[in-house]
Each structure stands twice: as C-alpha cells, then as structure tokens.
C-alpha cells in the first residue's frame, strides 16, 4: 500500500472517530450527575496540586540539604570565602535552574557557630516579585551551624508547570491585607500593578482570565464553582504558610462543555458504539505509531547529516518495507556515505599523517602544512571559515596541586571531550600543551559562537581523572572568522590569540571574539 493510501485510511478513521465523538457531545445529562462529576474533577485537580507542591517541596529540601553538605560550601562559610562558595553552588544552580526546578539559591552566614540541632526551615512568603516557596537548610561544621543555604521556587513557575501538566488554567488569589503587611508601600504598588483586585484578593495567573467570572467568586468559601451559562468549572484550595496562616487560595479552572461531565448518562449509547470506536482507535494508533517511528528515524538521519556527524550514519541500515519512506531513507543514507567519501578524498594527507602523539589530534605541523590551503579553498567557493583557540584554565596550579604526572592524562581527556563535541567536518589541532586550535569550515561567526559555548559548557560539566579521584576543568576560548584569503597560518594564530587573551583577561571560563 502506498503512503498516500495509508494517509487516506488514517484520515477516514479520524473522521469516523470525530463523528462518533460529535454525536455523543450533543446528548444531555442529568443535573445530579453533572454536579457529582464537577466535584470529582475538582477533587482530582486539588489532589494533583497538592501532590505536585509536595514534590517540589521535597525537591527544594533535597537540593538545600545537598548543597549544605558540600565541603566547599561548609569551608566557604567558615572562612567567609565567597568564591569557594560559588564553586560549590554554581554547578548545582545552573543545572537545576536551567530546567526550571528551582528559582534562587542564597547563602547566609551566622555571626558565630550555633547549635548543631538546627532543623531545615520551610518558608512561603510574599515578595515584590510574587509568592516564593523556600527551604533553608543549616550548614553544619565541626563546631556547629555556621550558616544556612536557602533554595526557593517561584510560585509563578510552579503555576506554569501545573498548567502544562494538567491542561487547566490556574492562578493564586492572595489576601490583599497580608500582601500590604508583607511589603512596603512602594513595593505593594509595584506588586499590585501586574495583578488585579477582586473582593479583597489580588489575582495572579500566568494566563489571561475571564474577569467577569472571576469577579463573582468568593474565594473564602472554597470548594467547587460551576457556571452553567459558559461551562466554566473553577476549583479552589487554601494556600498556607509555615505558621498555618492562609495567604490566599490556589484556583484552577477549565471549560467543560459537556463531553467529560456527561459520560455517565450515555451508557446505553456507549455500550453500542464503544466496541467499534475502540477498534477504530486501536487501528489508527497502531498505523500512526509505525508511520511516526519511521518518520522520526528519517528526521534523526537528517539531523546527523545537517550536524556533520557522518560517522554516526555507519551503524544505520535501511528499514523495511522499501516503500516511499524506505526509498527516502535509503537515499539519505547513500548521500551520507558519498559525503563521507568525498571528505576523505578531499584531504587524504590530513587523515594519514601529522597526528599528535599524545592526543591523536592533528599536530601544529599539520596546521602549518595544510591549514592555509584548507581555509583558502573554502573561501574561494564562498563558504565562511571560523577559527577557535581553546586553552585550559589554571593548568599549572592544578598540576601543582595534584602532581605533574596527571598533566598528560588531563590534556588527553580534554582533547577527547573537544573531539566528541565537534562535527566530523571540523578539524582539531593541538598547538602546544593544553592549547588547541579548531577550524570550522562552512561556519560563520554566529555559528562559531554557538560551537564555542557548547565546548565551554561541555568541558565545564565533565569530570577529569586526577589520581584516584576526579576534578573539574574550565577553558577559555578565542574566536574569529576568516573573511579573506590568508598567506601564513601565523596570521590566523596571532588574530585568534588576541581573542583568547581577552577571554583570559576578563575572568576565564568564557569566550571572546576578535572581529
């Protein structure tokens, strides 16, 4: 069967299912069952809210406990060394905040060692930016508590996550009197500017709300509110701080036009039609699943081609059956094979000699012999070429600390991390020591900046062997784009070295550009 025929069958099945659903949606239900279903939906919504909030609280407690036990954090608080504190907090914060799991991480230092019996403190407070949930965990040294690590989560972020999981609109109704007590007059004015007041509450929501409906709600009454005219179902639950005070109410709302709420009254109709609908759905899902899997495979192959990772295509074999999609997949794999052969024929000398003995990358001699020709050939056909110069930060200090015998292993592992992050079409040269130069054919300055940032982050999160343990390294990267033919590779090295010097001078573990 052709792809067009399969799509026609899928469309037919979808039409039949949609038609059956439309017939069911036109039927009416009794008032009692409608109310029962409203309460059931609201109970389920509130339960999900509380479970997700508990999960986020456990996440905050776990993160604050983990950070509080970090030796660098303990030592940094004891000595008042904030740079040491940053090295302890930085990796955890960047990883978790990038995923939206936490908001802020702050550290406070005790004026003197306190009792070792201090417990983690939960705090839900109102600030100028909104409601924040946080856990402050004690940092315990040998002589007692020397400070606290506080990890917080913005409730606005939590609301967006809840809405994305449940599909319901949601928000917070905060008691206006408590907000006024918690903020200064100017802070309250800025806080209220982005929210609207309803019956003594300030409404906060990541989505646009129906003010006409919300204004009729009495949040203090709690429970379930069902508006029959517009089909709006609204559920509320109290929001309490650590002292048990009600700061306001969480609310969730959804449009229930009748399909989900009236199912219990349609048993005779469903008994007749559900077997047919079930078979249609199963057939549709199976056919669509197989088709989707093959399309995803083609997208994966296309992504490898676009990113230049041609070596990864060697493990792929064309799947059956050999229909329209199979032929597209076969053609893409053949294209990848021919591209790889072309690249190998284009620079045979580079691939057979001039390798660095320690790292296996191209050597400085290879750069001198073939670099200029490689750059000028790409410029001649209108393709941009960018150059990166990568240098490990503080290698001398690290080797003094862990012993000079680890230097070669660190350089070798660093070259491995760089090579794994680059494309097959990129060229990696070891200049000297922990200094590497990278040629990016066909890459503009904008693309080179993305590559440089990927390399910097990859090195920063990698673990490098040092004796019996592991350490972390950072690199500084200079970047430049070559726009006109060059006569001597020394010109390129000198230009990109200026960018590297700027990256080192402005703090290390960063990238800089030489225009």
Image (cartoon, helix red, strand yellow):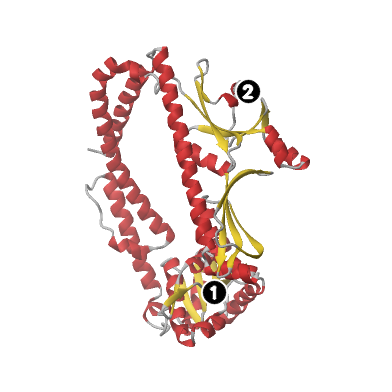
Say which quadrant the C terminus sits in: bottom right
**In front: 420, or 254?**
254
Q: Position of residue 441 (x, y in %)?
A: 49, 67
Q: Which mark is residue 215?
A: 2
**In front: 485, or 19?**
19
Q: Farthest right residue?
A: 185
Q: Position of residue 362 (x, y in %)?
A: 44, 79
Q: Secondary structure at mark 1?
A: strand
Q: Position of residue 495 (x, y in %)?
A: 62, 76
Residue occupying the point 59% across, 28% down = 209
Q: Does residue 318 appear left or right of residue 454 in this picture?
A: left
Q: Position of residue 423 (x, y in %)?
A: 43, 66
Residue occupying the point 54% across, 55% down = 119
Q: Is residue 500 above or below residue 187?
A: below
Q: Farthest bottom residue?
A: 404
Among the two numbered marks 1 and 2 on one chain, the one whose residue lies closer to the N terminus: 2
User: Does residue 297 appear in the picture of this structure?
Assistant: yes
Do the residues bearing badges 1 and 2 touch, measured as CB atoms within 8 Å?
no
Q: Residues within 10 Å of mark 1 (few under 14, many from 20)?
A: many
Q: Does residue 81 appear left or right of residue 434 in this picture?
A: right
Name the residue tied to disc 1.
Answer: 390
Residue occupying the point 24% across, 45% down = 323
Say which quadrant the N terminus sits in: top left
Q: Is residue 257 above or below residue 10?
A: above
**In front: 302, or 415?**
415
**In front: 271, or 308?**
271
Q: Is residue 450 above or below residue 235?
A: below
Q: Secondary structure at mark 2?
A: loop
User: Does residue 422 appear in the picture of this structure?
Assistant: no
Q: Is residue 72 above or below residue 356?
A: above
Residue occupying the point 54% across, 85% down = 400
Q: CA distance from mark 1 to mark 2?
A: 60 Å
């Amino acid at each position: 069967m052709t792809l067009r025929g399969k799509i026609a069958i899928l469309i037919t099945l979808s039409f039949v299912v949609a038609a059956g659903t439309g017939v069911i949606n036109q039927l009416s239900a009794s008032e009692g069952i409608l109310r029962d279903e409203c309460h059931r939906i609201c109970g389920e919504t509130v339960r999900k809210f509380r479970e997700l909030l508990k999960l986020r609280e456990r996440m905050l407690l776990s993160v604050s406990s983990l950070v509080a036990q970090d030796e660098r954090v303990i030592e940094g608080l004891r000595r008042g060394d904030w740079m040491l504190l940053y090295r302890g907090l930085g990796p955890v914060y960047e990883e978790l905040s990038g995923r939206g799991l936490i908001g802020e991480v702050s550290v406070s230092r005790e004026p003197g060692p306190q009792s070792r019996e201090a417990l983690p403190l939960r705090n839900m407070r109102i600030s100028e930016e909104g409601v924040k949930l946080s856990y402050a965990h004690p940092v315990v040294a040998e002589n007692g508590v020397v400070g606290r690590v506080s990890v917080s989560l913005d409730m606005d972020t939590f609301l967006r996550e809840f809405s994305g999981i449940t599909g319901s609109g949601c928000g917070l109704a905060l008691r206006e009197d408590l907000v006024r007590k918690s903020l200064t007059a100017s802070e309250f004015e800025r806080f209220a500017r982005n929210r609207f007041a309803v019956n003594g509450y300030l409404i906060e929501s990541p989505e646009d709300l129906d003010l006409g409906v919300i204004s009729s709600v009495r949040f203090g009454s709690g429970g379930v509110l069902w508006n029959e005219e517009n089909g709006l179902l609204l559920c509320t639950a109290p929001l309490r701080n650590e002292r048990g005070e009600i700061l306001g109410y969480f609310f969730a709302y959804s449009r229930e036009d009748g399909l989900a709420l009236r199912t219990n009254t349609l048993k005779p109709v469903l008994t007749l039609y559900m077997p047919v609908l079930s078979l249609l759905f199963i057939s549709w899902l199976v056919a669509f699943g197989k088709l989707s899997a093959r399309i995803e495979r083609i997208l994966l192959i296309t992504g490898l081609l676009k990113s230049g990772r041609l070596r990864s295509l060697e493990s792929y074999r064309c799947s059956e059956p050999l229909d329209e999609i199979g032929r597209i997949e076969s053609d893409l794999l053949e294209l990848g094979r021919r591209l790889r052969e072309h690249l190998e024929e284009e620079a045979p000398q580079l691939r057979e000699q001039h390798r660095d003995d320690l790292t296996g990358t191209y050597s400085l001699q290879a750069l001198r012999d073939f670099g200029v020709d490689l750059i000028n050939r790409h410029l001649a056909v209108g393709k941009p070429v960018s150059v990166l110069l990568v240098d490990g930060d503080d290698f001398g200090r690290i080797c003094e600390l862990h012993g000079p015998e680890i230097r070669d292993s660190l350089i070798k592992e660093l070259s491995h991390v760089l090579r794994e992050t680059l494309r097959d079409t990129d060229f990696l040269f070891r200049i000297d020591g922990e200094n590497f130069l990278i040629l990016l054919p066909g890459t503009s300055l904008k693309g080179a900046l993305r590559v440089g940032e990927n390399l910097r982050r990859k090195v920063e999160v990698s673990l490098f062997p040092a004796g019996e343990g592991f350490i972390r390294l950072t690199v500084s990267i200079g970047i430049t784009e070559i726009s006109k033919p060059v006569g001597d590779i020394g010109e390129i090295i000198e230009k990109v070295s200026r960018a590297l010097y700027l990256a080192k001078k402005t703090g290390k573990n960063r990238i800089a550009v030489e225009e």
